[in-house]
Image (spheres, rainbow, N blue to C red):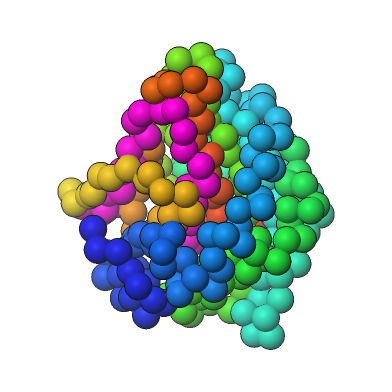
Amino acid sequence: MRTVEDRNDIVQEMRAQGFCLVTPAMLQACFGVAPAALAPLLPSWDDLPRDGYLKDGGKYRARRHGSFVQTITPPSLVQVPHRAHWQPLDYNALHGGIERWFEPIEPPVCATAAWRTLLTQVGEVCATVSSQSKWFIEAHQFRIDTAEGIGRPTPEGAHRDGVDFVAVVLVNRRGVKGGESRVFDAHGPNGVRFTLTESWSVLLLDDARVIHETTPIQPDGEKGVRDTLVLTYRAGGFQDPD
């Protein structure tokens, strides 16, 4: 899979195949923020509450959630009052159809300039790909650990999210093996498999065109974790129950 070097590359790759990978070295050129500027956010992943909605009974996932509205012109990013995360069963057969109230992302995180730059710049690139002027963004801080032996980043399996674009940001990975990312054409047999290993790598996905999943992680040392930031961009409004 070819890595992109600037925003034009992202637009071309997204339009050609529906996904692309931005390496940490290219983060500044593509999204206007350097890994060093994001590093102060790392401690916030150590304070994520357990996900109490896992239907497999596991204790391997912790998370926080926040929602934002981005306007492209004039540029603005506004955090909206805390709300439930909801997906239809068509997109999440395991956890869909219910309102899941996760603890909110902490205010100092959302106020950080690097955080706001990442959300808005990814949104601007996605808007160029699809000619949108406004995004309804959901941000999810995830930690998957191996304290019970196996951790499942996507317990629902290969899926789409019911949005326009998804950005999966690898924040930290230590003491684990596995966690292979798999991206497949939603309407055909083609697909790729690879493993995100570098902190602040960004996998950008066109949710209408590709299906994605991450395989389970297993311990490869003590206190194994895989931390990610998942951002979803949707035109027209947040997903809500009818």
Q: Residue at (48%, 61%) from the top-left corner? A: 164
Whether residue 87 sits left or right of residue 80 in the image: it is left
Q: Residue furthest bottom?
A: 74
In the image, residue 62 above or below residue 8:
above
Is 73 drawn above or below residue 167 in the view shown? below
Numbered-mark total: 0
Query: Residue 183: horizontal and vertical position, in percent?
Result: 31, 48
- Counting from the top left corner in percent of width and height, residue 94 is at 50, 29
Q: Residue at x 63, y 69 (%)?
A: 117
Stretch in magenta: 162-188
Residue 44 horizontal/vertical position (percent): 69, 42
The structure residue drawn at horizontal position 65% and vertical position 64%, both measured from the top left corner, is 114
Front-most of residues 105 and 135:
105
Give coordinates of residue 99: x percent, y percent. 68, 37
Prevailing secondary structure class for the magenta stretch in the rendered image: strand
Any part of residue 207 in sight: no
Whether residue 177 appears in magenta in the rendering, the answer is yes
Quadrant holding the N terminus? bottom left
Instruction: Compare residues 35 and 112 and report the one nearer the observer.
Output: 35
User: Quadrant of the rendered structure where residue 50 is?
Assistant: top right
Whether residue 189 is in magenta: the answer is no
Residue 65 visible (yes or no): yes
